[in-house]
Each structure stands twice: as structure tokens, then as C-alpha cells.
Amino acid sequence: MWNEITSIVKQELDSREQLLWAGQPRKGLALRASDAMMIPFSLLWGGGVISAEYSAIRSPRGGSGFGGILFVSIGLYMIIGRFFVDSWKRDKTYYGVTDQRIIIVSNLFGRKLKSLNIRTLLDVTLEQKSDESGTITFNSLENEKHWWNRSRRGGPELPSFEMIQEAKKVYEIIREAQRRAA
């Protein structure tokens, strides 16, 4: 698996770049902090929609048609489907740190590459858990230029290495690369 991750990231390297680290997010189903609110909401909303559609199907008039199927589908996605989609997205995501840049490769629907110059990183934020896994979030001059790129939560959509093993070690590799590049 390490060779697969390394080879995918190495495809993006320039001839003068040195790969310092390559990895992937944690695989499998995962809970996030936002699920503390999303799980109860999805169960209430999805359960209500499924219950209403079930009642409509059992009524003498029959089901509620396409709208009912659409809302039931959305409810099922919110309750369980989003966990599988998240797992699938993380399985198709690869991270790399070189002596010159941060690389994020996504092979979800075609190849998407995000590259951040190590010299233009303004902030590198580490969120670490007790098992030494964690998320490293990057804010760079490129992100600051695009102030209109806001998420639904109102903050900037910042690139990150999410749910990686040995997050502190990777953070130190990035900080050392920044010192050498300065």
C-alpha cells in the first residue's frame, strides 16, 4: 500500500523535488465532531420523511410519487449514505510533502490536484488526538487571495491532511521543510 501511495504522489513531482512524506486519510467509516448534531437531526428528519412516505403508500390514494422517493432518498443518505461517501472520498485521496510544496491528490471523478507552495504557507495548524492521528490544516497566500471562497459554515475552505496517522511527525516534517525553504 505504501508503494501505491508513494507512486501516485510521485507522479506529480517536478524533477527537482524530493518527496519527504506521503500518506492517506484513515480508511473506513469515521465519525466527525459535526456528527454530534448531524446524527440526531438526520434521524429526526429522515425518520419523519420515511414515516410520512410509508403512511402515504398505505393510504387508499397510494404513494406520494417522485417527491416522496426523492425525500426518502435524501433522508437515507443523511442517515447512513454520507458515511459511505465520506469513506469512499478518503480512500481516493493521497497526500504528499516535498521540499517545495504540499500536494493533495484526489482520484474521485478524474484526477484533481491541489498544490501549495511551502514558502507561501501562512498557517499550518495541527489538531491531534490521543492516538496520535489528526488533521493538519493549511492556510496560504493563495487562499487569502480568494476571499470569496467560503464554506457553508462561513469560514474559508482550507486544504488539509485529514485523519492521518502520526500527525505530529508529519507536522514536524512540514515545519522543517518550511525552515529549509526560507
Image: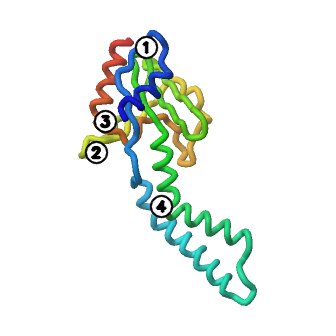
As rendered, which of 39 and 147 lies closer to the eye?
A: 39
Residue 167's spot in the image, x, y percent? 31, 35
Separation (CA) of disc 2 from disc 3: 9 Å
Separation (CA) of disc 3 from disc 4: 26 Å
Which comes before the other along the chain, label 3 or label 1?
A: 1
Mark 3 vs 4: CB contact within 8 A: no
Q: Label for residue 17?
A: 1
Residue 11's spot in the image, x, y percent? 49, 22
- In the rendered image of this protein, does residue 94 appear above or below residue 141? below
Hey, what amino acid is under mark 1? Glu
In this figure, which residue is indicated by the disc labeled 2?
Answer: 129
Hey, what amino acid is under mark 4? Met
Hey, what amino acid is under mark 3? Ala
In this figure, which residue is indicated by the disc labeled 3?
Answer: 167
Q: Mark 3 against mark 4, which lies toward the viewer? A: 3
Looking at the image, which residue sits at the far left? 130
Which image quarter: residue 67? Answer: bottom right
